[in-house]
Amino acid sequence: MSAFDSPNFKRVKAEYYLKLAESGFKDIEGSNGRIMESHTQNSFFKRHQTFRMTLYEETREYYDWAAELVHRGMFESERDKQIWTLHSEGKTASEIGFLIGLDGSWINRLIRKLRRELLINLDLTFYEYDERG
């Protein structure tokens, strides 16, 4: 007889399983000792969902910030303001380039330049700006 088959082992095992269940512990291993598939899928889904929600919130905050800067009138030209406005609406550089008639990679460089200049003019980073409200 194996030690795992003894009546004493089975009694102690039952006691501890009861204590674990009462404490709210949820075992991720099945009776065969392997991690249950539903647990790994659930964990991945929850982590992925949390990541997506965080990314969505940060993206929304950035575009809200970008839209607010349109109204501050800190652009050198009407074209720059138009490009930044389209950017703050979530349009891609390719879409903006198509609408304005310029190359998307040029638009991308201009957006990065405008972002850098706007932050310098405001003397803060996007995150500092976000904290000030």
Image: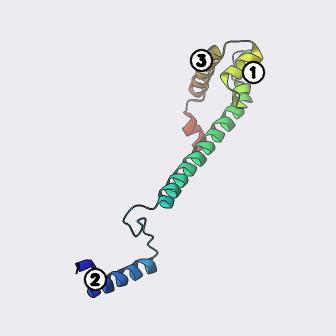
Q: Which residue is mark 1?
A: 82
The amino acid beneath tag 3 is Arg
Q: Which mark is residue 109?
A: 3
- Mark closest to the chain's N terminus, 1 or 3: 1
**Viewer-side residue, 41 vs 32:** 32
Percent x, y of residue 50: 56, 51
**Split into 4 quadrants, where in the image is the C terminus?**
top right
How far across and down, in percent of the image, does residue 88 sit?
Answer: 70, 30
Residue, x 74% and y 17% (percent of image)? 98
Give the side of residue 98 with respect to residue 22, left or right: right
Q: CA distance from mark 2 to mark 1?
A: 75 Å
Give the quarter of the image for residue 95.
top right
Label 2 sits on a secondary structure element that is helix
Viewer can see residue 83? yes
- Choose the circle earlier in sequence order: 3 or 2: 2
Q: Is residue 88 above or below residue 20?
A: above
Q: Residue at x 65, y 17 (%)?
A: 104
**Is residue 43 or residue 32 the one in the foreground?**
32
Residue 85 location (% of width, % of height): 73, 26
Name the quadrant of the N terminus.
bottom left
Depicted 70 relative to depicted 15: above or below: above
